[in-house]
Each structure stands twice: as C-alpha cells, then as structure tokens.
Amino acid sequence: MKPKRHPNLNHLARRRAQPRSSQTRPLAFLFALTLLITTFTATAQQKKSSFADLTQLFAEWRAFQRPDLGVGVPDYTARAMSAQQGELPAFQRRLAAVATSGWPIREQVDWHIVRAEMNGLDFDHRVLRPWANNPGFYVTVFFDRSDQPAREGPHAYGAVEIWRYTFPLSAERAAEMGAAIRMIPKLLEQARKNLVGKGRDLWIYGTKDVREQSSSLTRLATLIADGPGELNSGIARAKEATDRFIEWLEAQALSKTAPSGIGIENYDWYLKNVQLVPYTWQEEVALMESELARAHAFLALEEEKNRDLPQPAAVASDTEYTHRFNAGVTEYMSFLKEREILTIKEYMDPELRAQIGKFNPGPREFFGEIDYRDPEVMRTHGYHWFDLARMEHEPHADPIRRGPLLYNIFNTRTEGHATGWEELMMQAGMFEARPRSRELIYILIAERAARALGELRMVSGEFTLEQAAEFTSHHTPRGWLSLKGNLVRSEQHLYLQQPGYGTSYLVGKKQIEMLLAARKMQLGENFRMKQFMDSFDAAGLVPASLLRWELTGQMPDDVKRMLASH
C-alpha cells in the first residue's frame, strides 16, 4: 500500500490533466482556496506589523512599567508587584507578535531593546526584587548629577534631583520640590512592610545610603532656610521619617545573614537577556583577569621606559586647580578638532568646563589621584557629558532611543565607550608630550578590571562585599584605591544592586573596539575616525552589541547566538 501524499498546490496542478471524479474536484478546489486564503492572511498580518506598532507598544510598555501612584506614592507592595508581574507576559506576547521581517536593521535593533527592557522587569520580579531586598532602593534624594542617562542602579520612582534646581527657588519650583518631598514619609513607611529580604550586604550598605539621604535633607534644609514654610516643614518631616527608617533598618540588621549575590545562572541569564552582552560569567572572569594582567604588565613597561622622567606633581592649590583643569579642557578640545577625531559641537566645551568642580586639598579618592596629576586624562572619560548634552540639544528622532533606556542597559555603550576612549586617545597621541600620563591610563584599566572581578565573585558567592573591596584595593596600583575611603565599597555596592554594571566598562570597551576594527576592515583606506564617530554618536545610547550589528550591517556570531534564543 502506497503512503498517503499530503496535497499541495503543485501536486494539484500536476493532477489537473488527469480525470477526476465529481467528488474529488470540489475537495481539491476547496483545499487550494483555503491555502490561498491562509497565505493571504499571513501576508496581511506581516504587513500589519510596522515600526509604528512597535513605538506604540513601547509607549504603553513604559507607562505600564512605572509603579501605580494611586495610593499617593509609588506602590511597591507585594500585592501591587504581584499584579504587575501577572500582567507582564501579555506585553511580552504582544511584542513577540510584532513581525520584524523586512525591517531595517535599526528598527530590528529597537525591537530587541524593548524586549530587553521587558526582560529587565521580569528579572526584577523573579530575582532582584529590589523593593523587597534592597533598602537603598528607597533613597530618592540626590544632590549630585549622575553622568549617565539615568541614575545608576535601581531606585524607587519619584527621585528628587536637587542638582536640577537653582536656589533660591521660585514659587513654582518650590511647589514642585515640595510635592516630591512630601512623598518620602509615606514611601518609607511602605518600605518597612515591603523589605523582607535576608541579604546582609544589601541591607548593611543600603542602610548606609539611607543615612546619606538624612544628611542630604539636612543640607537641603539649610539651602532653603528662607524659602516657603510649607517646603521647610515638608523637608523636616522627610528627615524625621528617614531617621526613623534608619533606626528600623538597624534594628533588623542582625537577622540579615544571607549572601546578596544572585548566582552565576541568574547572572548569565541577565547578561544575555537584559544587558544584551553575549558573554557568560566565566567568559567575563577570563576577560577581566586578562585585562588586569595586561594593565599591570603595560604599566610596568611604561614605568621602566619613563624611569628617568619626573612623576607629574599633583595639583596643590585652588588657583592651580582652576588653571590646570581649564587648560586641560582647552587642550583636549583642540586635540579632537585638530586631529579630526569627531565633529565638535558648540555645547561640548561648556559641558566639560561645567564639570570642573572645586579644589580638594585631600584626602582624595582614586579618580582624584588620577585627575590631579593630569587633568586631561579624565576629560576623555568625560565623553559622558557629550552624550548627555547631545540628548538635550539633539534629541534622537527615534522615540525608543530618545530618552534613557531602562535597567541601565545603555552601560556597555556609555561606560564602555568612555573607558575605551581613554586608551584610544592615548594611542592617538594625546600624551606624547607627557609620557608619564600614559601610566595613568593603565592604572585606570587595572582598577576597572579589579573591581569587575570583585563584582563577579560577589555574584558567585566567593566574596562578600568587604572581600570584594579588599581585592579591588589590593589590585589597584600605587595604593590609590584605599580601604579608608568610601569609593571602593560604594562601587561594589552599586554592582551588587545592578548586575553587569561593574563589568560593563571593559566589556563595552572590548565590544566597541571590535566595532571600530570591523568598520576599518570594511572601509579600508576610506576609513576616517571622524565619520565613524559621527555615525557612532548618531546611533544613540544603545547596547554595544547592537551597535556593532547596526553600524556594520553584519551580525557577529556571538550576537547572533545571543539573540537567536528569544
């Protein structure tokens, strides 16, 4: 007996010349008609998925991602978070139904960005649960401006960014600040019920962040001492609520004995599905160990080469500080322009000068030790301020890229590029007249690699936060990252809260160097750094892995494997 053949249109066409019974002919016709209708419907469905569909979904998704404010403050209660988690899969299904076949690469990249953000919320609910595990999540008062598109790490909605205000406050701005300040007591009261986590390091160092909020509120009260009475009383109540919250946190501390790391399996998932980094924990360990060794080895060679040259003297006075830091900006901007490294915009110079700050007689933290020896070095890392100014003065036409991406998934682009830019500018000749400044670049790389290894070993449970700080301090050259300072522990605390952040500096650097190399290979003698940087900046602050795909038109194998499993 012959096996049955599944009919299709070609098979039916071949049979048209053969005699058919009156019963077979209608069945064949109906089957062909059904197949044509199905094909037409599928094609029509594909056409319905436009980029506008994605941007509309993106707008709805962003509104959904924000916490409910129906109770007067952001609602992070167990009930509200459970409801949000239950509704998230519907958004993910809607995104999966958006067909991107035939879309330009740029639009396909946007689809993956939206997917990564949704995965970020999913991971928050399943693993991080910052509203339940991290007291620092409830810190909402910040004096200093972040150099990132959005403040690093997870924080409750409704931050009071004091740096945005000019004092004395206008009546309108005072009312705006007062509304945000009034939310603090209710939010902290809610936090007492929400915080049920057992992770010790998150609890202890999160409590330290809350103490800093208390100090910030004291400082704010001084700034607006002659301001509206309602704002003064609101700040006083917020300070009192913060202090009571600190007392409660300290009373709970002894019961917090569990590790705070998320584990390697969770970390690998987060890298791949949220940060869009095509590496594993183990691969990142290998990369960071290699970079740490490279930095120390190259530093040794530079020190040997420069041994007859004097070490640069650190800035020693306020007058010298003002002169040398402004001169550093001038020299840096002239270097970029004369070497035609990128297109200079009128907002770049003022943005860098606005961040110069004031002289600090000491003791100084790690980056101050670098800065005070050659103020031009850290101006290269100040590419962050170019990025932020571009967002303000030249907002991206694409609504998905116009504002900060959620869950800090911009960091391989922002931190990775700024870190890579330091060494790229050195290789471009910036420090030819000051050879000992080359040593500072390798010291910076060593510190980034050491602290990244601290993060990775907290993830795996090999290190506590204190052990990560000790490791990082020990492996940073010249003793400039002292355990007596605050920086070494605050950095590790950030990386414990925001997985993948500590490694993003060198992972992003590596990815952007690979992008640069790929474009040089494609263009050959036609490659020009200025044109490359113009296209790089125009693409926006998206993950470095996607930038390489978009700017080269080719998807690397590691990125292809990473994205294939969605």
Image (cartoon, rainbow, N blue to C red):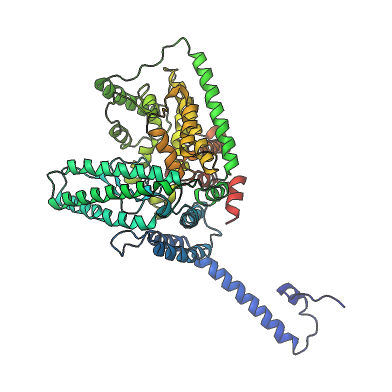
Q: Is residue 244 left or right of residue 19?
A: left
Q: Is residue 315 left or right of residue 517?
A: left
At horizontal 42% and vertical 55% (from top left) the residue drawn is: 196
Res 215 quadrant in image = top left
Above or below, 564 relative to 210: below
Report the number of discs: 0
Quarter of the C terminus within the rendering = bottom right
Q: Which of the pair 309/280 is nearer the observer? A: 280
Spot occupied by residue 435 in the image (x, y as percentages of width and height) = 45, 17
Q: Which of the pair 108/373 is nearer the observer? A: 373
Q: Which of the pair 187/305 is nearer the observer? A: 187
Spot occupied by residue 105 in the image (x, y as percentages of width and height) = 52, 52
Res 422 quadrant in image = top left
Q: Which of the pair 94/140 is nearer the observer? A: 140
Spot occupied by residue 464 in the image (x, y as percentages of width and height) = 49, 39
Quarter of the N terminus within the rendering = bottom right
**Residue 325 visible, this angle:** yes
Q: Is residue 228 left or right of residue 518?
A: left
Above or below, 480 relative to 172: above
**Residue 395 visible, this angle:** no
Above or below, 25 relative to 64: below
Spot occupied by residue 248 in the image (x, y as percentages of width and height) = 33, 50
At horizontal 61% and vertical 74% (from top left) the residue drawn is: 38
Above or below, 474 relative to 162: above
Residue at far bottom of view: 22
At horizontal 60% and vertical 40% (from top left) the residue drawn is: 283
Residue at far right of view: 1
